[in-house]
Structures are given as structure tokens and as C-alpha cells.
Amino acid sequence: MNLVELAQRIRSYRLDRRTTLEELASRAGLTRSWLSKVENFRVTPSLPALGKIAAALEVTVAQLVEGLDQQPRLIVVRKHERKVVERDRSESNLTVYESLAHKRAHRVMDPFLLTLPAESARKVALAHEGEEFLMVQSGEVDFEYEGEVYSLRAGDCLYFDATAKHRLLNPYLRPAEVLCVFHEGNGR
């Protein structure tokens, strides 16, 4: 099942009901912090936890996961069809995440175009499951990985184990765009 689509669906149901993370967490018997990680596709909820979330949202688990296992052989996402995904908004300092493959519900990779405003940085380095690939499309960025900082320009790429703490920073005077591809598994 696709974690990004599930996370967005949970968040969408919550917002449609004008419910805060705290309210939903309380109704579901979960912590706000954990639920935030689910909505930001940092953790995958277990089936029992998904059941609690669905009940708190007054929907069925089937409604939450409907269609997430369908896999067309080919999808086309036009530039105007990109889907902006909210991710760690309080931590990312206005970085915009555009999903580039949201039409394929069950996928092993999640490609995004990240737009980092000038003079911005995620507040803290974070880790998550899987592997990640980055390619700077325009501008310049710094990438912090386990405390070491790498300066990158347009055309530069990184491929790394995402279980180590990492973050993108744009201390420069111009915005930057970075192609980012997540892979939730370990690649083996």
C-alpha cells in the first residue's frame, strides 16, 4: 500500500471534518506526535491503529484504503496535475513538496519536486525508513547528513540511506528546486 496516498487520505478526511491532530489522536487513543508522523508519511500505521483512526474519522478502513492497491502499468502526470503534499510543515520552513506520481496508488518509489525558498532550512535533521535520491534541478542547496554538510549545485545528485538523520538547507539568496525520490523499502 502506498504510504503517501494513505497519509494524504487520512489528513484530507481529518481536515474535511475540521478536526485537529489533537482531537483525532484523542478520539483514536493515539498520540498527536505519532499521528503527525502518519500524516507526514514517516511511519506506517498497523492495521489495528488504522482501525482506530478510521473509527475516529467515522469512516471504514475500506474507505481509507480503497483503490490504494490498484496499479496501472503507466501513468502520466502533467505539470498542472502535480499534487502539493503537506509534509512536516512546521519543520520544513515552507518547502513545497509536489508529488510527481500520485496517480499510481501502489508504487515502490515516491518522486517529488521540492521547492526550497531562499534562506530556508528544516529546523532539525530527521530520519525515516528506506532510501532516497536527490538531484538539484536549479539553484544551490546544502545537504546535512549525520552532521556533515555537502554543498550542491544544479545537476549534483545524492543517493543515501534515509535511516540516518538528514535535511536540506537553502542558505542562499535564490529559491532552489530539487528532485527527490523516496523508496520506503531497503532495496533488497
Image: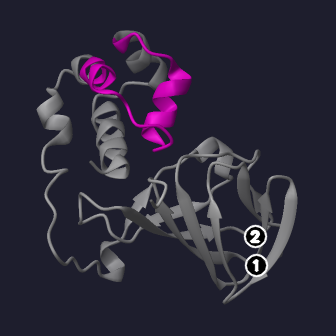
* Residue 44 within the segment the image draws in magenta: yes
Q: Looking at the figure, which quarter contains the C terminus?
A: bottom left
Circles 2 and 1: CB atoms closer than 8 Å: yes
**Image point (29%, 26%), residue name:** 50
In the displayed structure, would residue 4 be above or below residue 46?
below
Q: CA distance from mark 2 to mark 1?
A: 5 Å
Q: Residue at x 64, y 42 (%)?
A: 90
Q: Is 129 drawn above or below residue 48 in the view shown?
A: below
Residue shown at 35% from the left, 14% from the top: 28
The magenta-colored residue range is: 28-53
Q: Could you tell me residue 92's position as x and y percent? A: 65, 51
Q: For the residue carrying disc 1, how many other residues have a C-alpha within 10 Å: few (<14), some (14-19), or many (20+)?
A: some
**Residue 67 in the image, given as x and y percentages of width and height:** 13, 50
Q: Position of residue 145 (x, y in %)?
A: 78, 58
Q: Residue furthest right?
A: 148
| Residue 88 picture quarter | top right
**Most foreground residue, 144 or 92:** 144
Classified by dominant secondary structure, the portion drawn in magenta counts as helix
Task: Tell me, for residue 130, which label it has, or none.
Answer: none
Please check the rendered image and state whether residue 80 is part of the magenta-colored stretch, yes or no. no
Question: Three-letter amino acid code at disc 1?
Answer: Arg
Q: Is residue 51 left or right of residue 35?
A: left
Q: Is residue 55 left or right of residue 110?
A: left
- Seen from this angle, which residue lies furthest front? 188
Q: Which mark is residue 174?
A: 1
Residue on which disc 2 sits: 118
Q: Earlier in the sequence, mark 2 or mark 1?
A: 2
